[in-house]
Image (tube, grey):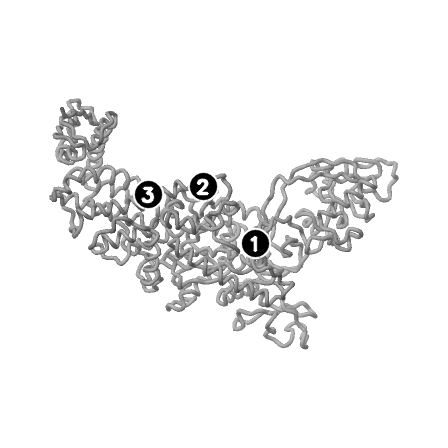
């Protein structure tokens, strides 16, 4: 086999290696593979902009683990999808193309979204391939393609038939900027928002104005942060235990400016310590208002339009934005003498995660999936899954326990998976599509019946199609079901896939979507199959910029496009950085860590290339040449066996960073700094069967163990130095290292002797360093005093010690102290 080139040039090598992977089909799913299945439910990235380094960080983790399990002989199913439907893609298209659906029409806008999505997906695939993901690109899907839409609509109809999905006109979390309902999981808490409590008087109806009531004379005082909602006030609430107001319960108050009479009611949710203790209930200012409206049967007065302006109920304030209305009403309250006090505060506001707009509560007809009545079911399901790291399960359970709403899956948008239903205009009966019709757009297709099944209404316009689309998570949450359809061209249809491969093995994602993608997928899987969707969840942290800010929010150039980093440092070096922090932890973007990765790539190449001079044509025997081993050889093999076990255990536990650290420590220190230097003289002498065996296996094992992390350089090294004797067409389908039993023989003695050899070597190196002389400078004698247990091994390694220290002689003495365990080293310089 020809020698490795003098230099490894990743600029040319990595693309060539990737082309070879693609042409050879090395990562293709094989249904006939005899290994245990390892199926990855890869997170489909949102097609809403560019890939940033945060994506590289988390997607590399999944690839590291998948490569490891492939080498363990498992049958890998590794698809890749793109989440290209719903609000994120709409907003991206609007910003990129400068178009709006309301301006160009629904169908034209959908075509714009589709065209842009396909362009971006092609760019994304090129990038992920350039990073070295071992994906089977034949198993590519998008959440808007025909197959995914059919799966999503089928799943929706099943939940509807089971009663687990329902439609209701109800108060809905609403984003005025995006003009759509949203789910609780899409709301971020924004702390520290400056506001003020404004105390205003509500006149008490039917009482003597001179009679003292509550906090004033003839009035009850209300402290509010939302004066713009006065027009929507339907009641005043006080706590039944609050002595200040108990006598007012059942009476009536009149709102300032608008002069509307509202009842004063008692409810324990009114906090006596907040504001004045008396609260105006508006429909709707917050979730408490929603609860009071339902529990007390209050009237409905909606004062806000879907785009966040005041409507006709607000009278003279109609058409103003909420911010404008607040300022104008405060001005009018002040002019009328209605402002009794104002107090600045900071509070937490719920905002839409997509655009940062304050969330409002509007009444709308929406589809919901039931969550609240099955919280314990979702918690129990989460406990049947192995979380890596385990503490991330607490985040999941905390989210479930804090749920206040069923899951709203309706979005008042244009581009997405449609609801396959129609409504009878006469009786509101819901007509569903048949299985044969799916996927279907009800706005383009008539229902499957000519008359309403409930009231027999007929005619050309007896029905109306559902005008909305599903939340993008409604489709992303059935990715396990989408995956089941991907293997059909290779002989495994969805039913066979479910029978053979359920549940899937791995769900990898960052911790910020535990509450969405993980939770929703668990919910859908329990409803659809009665089982958990996967057996393992791998949670990644976030990539941070040097200031500690999440990289996706950073202004760094790398946050916009990490391609430049791949070209500057190599894909392997960037992947090395992704494995620099323990599982689930955040890490900062670090050029120094990239450089460390580059140094490791170069060192591996150089170490193998140097060793080829001694291993060229070497065919390792099936059984170790134990009689040829020195203590140095036995030590490195014992260390290799120990490290292999440690790395294997770390990767089995999804602790890839710990595994990488173990490999590096062994490679840099034990193998390169010590063993190679110790055995050079023997290798050059030509009579070194023991050293050649140990060196071959150490380098082969290191190459294989680094392969999940550095897939390109390890492939080049393997094909150039080991494939002929190891027998695999790629390091990535070669067998994971397995130590020979003889390497463990008398392992404690081997490790102790090896440690003594290394200590003696380091003692001489220190001696030379202190005298500022080169390590290559010859010395006269190295004398080692050691306990009797080490004498034989040290004498056997004397030639190795003489070679590494440049000593004319190495003398081994027995330490006469029976309690001595370590060694003592003395050095005599040449005259």
Report how far apart the C-alphas of labels 2 and 1 lie in the structure: 37 Å
- In what element is the residue under mark 2? strand
| Residue pointed to by mark 1 | 371
Other residues around mark 3 within 10 Å, as few (<14) / some (14–19) / many (≥20): some
Q: Position of residue 800 (x, y in %)?
A: 16, 36
- 300 to 277, vertically: above or below: below
Q: Nearer the viewer, mark 3 or mark 2?
A: 3
Q: Nearer the viewer, residue 828 or 514?
A: 828
Q: Are marks 1 and 3 in contact (CB under 8 Å)?
A: no
| Residue pointed to by mark 2 | 588
**Numbered label attached to residue 106:** none
The numbered mark, 1 or 3, whose residue comes first in the sequence reads: 1
Q: Position of 216 compared to 302: left or right?
A: right
| Residue pointed to by mark 3 | 599
Q: Position of residue 357 (x, y in %)?
A: 63, 49
The numbered mark, 3 or 2, whose residue comes first in the sequence reads: 2
Q: Position of residue 705 (x, y in %)?
A: 30, 48
Q: Nearer the viewer, mark 1 or mark 3?
A: 3
Report how far apart the C-alphas of labels 1 and 3 lie in the structure: 51 Å
Report how far apart the C-alphas of labels 3 and 2 lie in the structure: 19 Å
- In what element is the residue under mark 1? loop
Q: Are marks 2 and 1 in contact (CB under 8 Å)?
A: no
Q: Position of residue 600 (x, y in %)?
A: 32, 44
């Amino acid at each position: 086999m020809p020698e490795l080139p003098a230099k490894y040039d990743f600029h040319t090598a990595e693309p060539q290696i990737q082309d070879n992977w693609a042409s050879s089909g090395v990562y293709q799913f094989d249904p006939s593979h005899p290994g245990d299945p390892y199926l990855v439910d890869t997170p489909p990235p949102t097609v809403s902009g560019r890939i940033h380094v945060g994506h590289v960080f988390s997607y590399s983790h999944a690839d590291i683990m998948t490569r490891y399990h492939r080498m363990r002989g498992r049958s890998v199913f590794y698809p890749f999808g793109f989440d290209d439907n719903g609000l994120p893609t709409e907003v991206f298209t609007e910003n990129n193309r400068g178009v709006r659906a309301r301006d160009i029409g629904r169908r034209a806008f959908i075509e714009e979204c589709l065209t842009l999505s396909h362009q971006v997906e092609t760019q994304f695939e090129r990038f992920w391939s350039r990073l070295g993901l071992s994906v089977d690109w034949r198993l590519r899907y998008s959440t808007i393609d025909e197959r995914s839409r059919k799966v999503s609509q089928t799943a929706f109809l099943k939940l509807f038939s089971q009663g687990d999905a329902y439609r209701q006109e109800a108060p809905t979390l609403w984003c005025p900027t995006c003009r759509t309902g949203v789910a609780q999981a899409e709301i971020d808490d924004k702390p520290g928002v400056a506001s003020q409590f404004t105390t205003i008087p509500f006149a008490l109806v039917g009482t003597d104005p001179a009679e003292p009531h509550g906090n004033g004379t003839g009035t009850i005082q209300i402290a509010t942060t939302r004066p713009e909602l006065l027009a929507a006030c339907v009641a005043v609430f006080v706590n039944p235990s609050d002595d200040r107001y108990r006598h007012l319960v059942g009476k009536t108050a009149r709102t300032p400016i608008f002069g509307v009479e509202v009842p004063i009611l008692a409810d324990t949710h009114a906090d006596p310590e907040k504001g004045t203790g008396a609260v105006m209930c508006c429909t709707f200012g917050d979730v408490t208002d929603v609860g009071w409206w339902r529990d007390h049967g209050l009237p409905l007065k909606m004062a806000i339009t879907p785009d966040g302006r005041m409507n006709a109920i607000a009278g003279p304030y109609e058409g103003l934005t909420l911010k404008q209305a607040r300022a104008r009403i405060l001005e009018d309250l002040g002019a009328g003498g209605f402002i009794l006090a104002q107090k600045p505060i900071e509070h937490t506001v719920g905002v839409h995660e997509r655009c940062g707009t304050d969330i409002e509560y509007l009444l709308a007809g929406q589809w919901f999936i039931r969550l609240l009545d099955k919280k314990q079911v979702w918690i129990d399901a989460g406990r049947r899954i192995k979380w890596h790291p385990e503490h991330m399960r607490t985040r999941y359970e905390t989210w479930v326990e804090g749920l206040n709403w069923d899951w709203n899956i309706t979005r008042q948008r244009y581009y997405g998976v449609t609801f396959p239903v129609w409504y009878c205009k006469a009786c509101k009966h819901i007509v569903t599509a048949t299985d044969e019709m799916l996927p279907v757009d009800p706005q383009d297709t008539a229902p499957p019946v000519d008359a309403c099944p409930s009231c027999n209404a007929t005619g050309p316009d007896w029905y109306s199609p559902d005008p909305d689309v599903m939340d993008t998570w409604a489709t992303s949450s059935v990715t396990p079901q989408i995956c089941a359809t991907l293997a059909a061209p290779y002989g495994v249809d969805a039913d066979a896939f479910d029978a053979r491969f359920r549940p899937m093995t791995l769900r990898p994602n960052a911790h910020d979507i535990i509450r969405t993608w993980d939770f929703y997928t668990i919910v859908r899987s329990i409803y659809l199959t009665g089982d958990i969707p996967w057996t393992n969840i791998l949670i990644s942290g976030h990539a941070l910029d040097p200031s500690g800010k999440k990289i996706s929010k950073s202004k760094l150039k790398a946050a916009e496009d990490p391609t430049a980093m791949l070209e500057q440092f190599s894909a392997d070096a960037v992947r090395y950085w992704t494995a620099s922090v323990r599982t689930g932890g955040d890490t900062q973007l670090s050029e120094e860590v990239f450089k460390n990765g580059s140094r490791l790539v170069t060192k591996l190449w150089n170490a193998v290339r140097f060793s080829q001079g001694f291993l060229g044509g070497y065919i390792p025997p099936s059984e170790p040449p134990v009689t040829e081993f020195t203590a140095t050889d036995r030590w490195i093999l014992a260390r290799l066996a120990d490290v292999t076990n440690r790395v294997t255990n770390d990767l089995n536990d999804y602790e890839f960073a710990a595994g990488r650290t173990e490999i590096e420590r062994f490679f840099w220190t034990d193998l390169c700094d010590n063993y190679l230097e110790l055995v050079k003289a023997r290798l050059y002498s030509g009579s070194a069967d023991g050293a050649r065996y140990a060196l071959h296996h150490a380098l082969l094992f290191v190459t294989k163990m680094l392969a999940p992390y550095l897939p390109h350089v390890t492939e080049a090294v393997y094909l150039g130095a080991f494939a002929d004797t190891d027998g695999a067409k790629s390091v990535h389908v070669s067998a994971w290292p397995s130590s020979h039993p003889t390497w463990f023989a008398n392992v404690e003695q081997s490790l102790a002797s090896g440690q003594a050899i290394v200590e003696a070597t380091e003692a001489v190196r220190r001696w030379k360093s202190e005298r500022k002389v080169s390590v290559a400078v010859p010395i006269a004698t190295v004398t080692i005093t050691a306990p009797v247990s080490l004498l034989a091994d040290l004498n056997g390694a004397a030639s190795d010690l003489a070679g590494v220290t440049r000593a004319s002689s190495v003398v081994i003495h027995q330490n006469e102290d029976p309690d001595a365990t370590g060694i003592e080293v003395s050095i005599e310089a040449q005259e």
